[in-house]
Image (cartoon, rainbow, N blue to C red):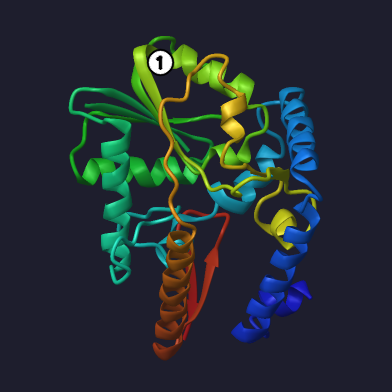
Amino acid sequence: MDWLLDGGWLPSPVIRTGIRRQLQQRLEAVKSASLEDAYARKMTFVEALRSRPIAIETDTANEQHYEVGTGVHQAYLGPRMKYSSCLYPNGGETIAQAEIAMLESYVQKAGLQDGQDVLDLGSKVTAFSNSKTQKIYIDGEAKKKQLSNLKVITGDVVDYEFEPSTYDRVISIEMFEHMKNYSLLMSKVARALKLRGKLFLHIFSHKDTPYDYEEGWMTTHFFTGGTMPSADLLHYFQDDLTLQKQWWVSGTHYAKTCEVCLVCQSARIYTDVQAGLVIAIDSKAEGSVAGAG
């Protein structure tokens, strides 16, 4: 089946039917017979996370996401290269407008201000990522925009220790879903924050049931070692940081983002074919493109 998907042989309606079937199977798998059973399962899951490392399968996650060539992402993302959900307050925004809408909401909710020291896990800004290709791209963009207050650190959050009491804000956009032991991770973040510093994070979540990605297409090809948090999962990990406020953004915004990215990617493929080119983007090399007329 994989070779049919990878080769582009299956039409979109067939793929969408398969996706909906897998989603229904997942909903059945996490469904509980009662509220009592649901909470018992959740508490078991929380205790299991506390006994695990901060993250697992980090090398595989790199291959699936973070070391994919930037050229691949440029084929379907908006101009801000936002590799996460955008925000469509009116529903008719372009991908560029939706990127800015979500980024502006981060600024407001996180209380970001000029002059702050900010650590972006993934004014003086430090970006932390386990991706070499992301560092190359960000450093290049910073040079073009003449930004001198941006530093990019390449490392693994599992074993990297940040300078203590350094940051006014730590921001994480859709990274915590790759983590397991939130107790250890929150402790690490707390040490990096200044007095009265804050952590702001954006995660996707199930409304009430957390689970591990252990099998299926998503696990094998896209989210090995991943976690689906429940909306309240981080409430159980407040030993070092205390939750002050939480927002819920409808999943329809993520669905819209994915649909728009698919349209952009399809348009890119169509344009390349119309130009008489066979395009092969090397996921192991930074933006490497090979073409044959």
| Image location (x, y in percent) of residue 173 | 45, 41
Picture quadrant where residue 85 is located:
bottom left
Q: Residue at x 73, y 49 (%)?
A: 213
Residue 166 visible somewhere in the drawing: no
Secondary structure of residue under mark 1: strand
Q: Which residue is mark 1?
A: 193
Q: Is residue 166 left or right of residue 147?
A: right
* Residue in front for this viewpoint, 111 or 189: 111
| Image location (x, y in percent) of residue 220 | 74, 56
Q: Residue at x 56, y 37 (%)?
A: 176
Q: Residue at x 35, y 17 (%)?
A: 197
Picture quadrant where residue 120 is located:
top left
| Image location (x, y in percent) of residue 20 | 67, 72
Count residues near mark 1 (Cα–Cα under 10 Å), then give few for <14, some for 14-19, many for 20+.
many
| Image location (x, y in percent) of residue 244 | 41, 25
Q: Measured along the vertical axis of the image, is residue 192 above or below residue 179?
A: above
Q: Measured along the vertical axis of the image, is residue 166 above or below residue 266?
A: above
| Residue type pointed to by label 1 | Leu
Instruction: Identify the image quadrant of the N terminus.
Output: bottom right
Residue 66 visible somewhere in the drawing: yes
Q: Is residue 29 left or right of residue 191?
A: right
* Residue in front for this viewpoint, 291 or 195: 195
Q: Measured along the vertical axis of the image, is residue 43 above or below residue 21?
A: above
Q: Residue at x 76, y 26 (%)?
A: 47
How many numbered marks are there? 1
Q: Is residue 32 left or right of residue 93?
A: right
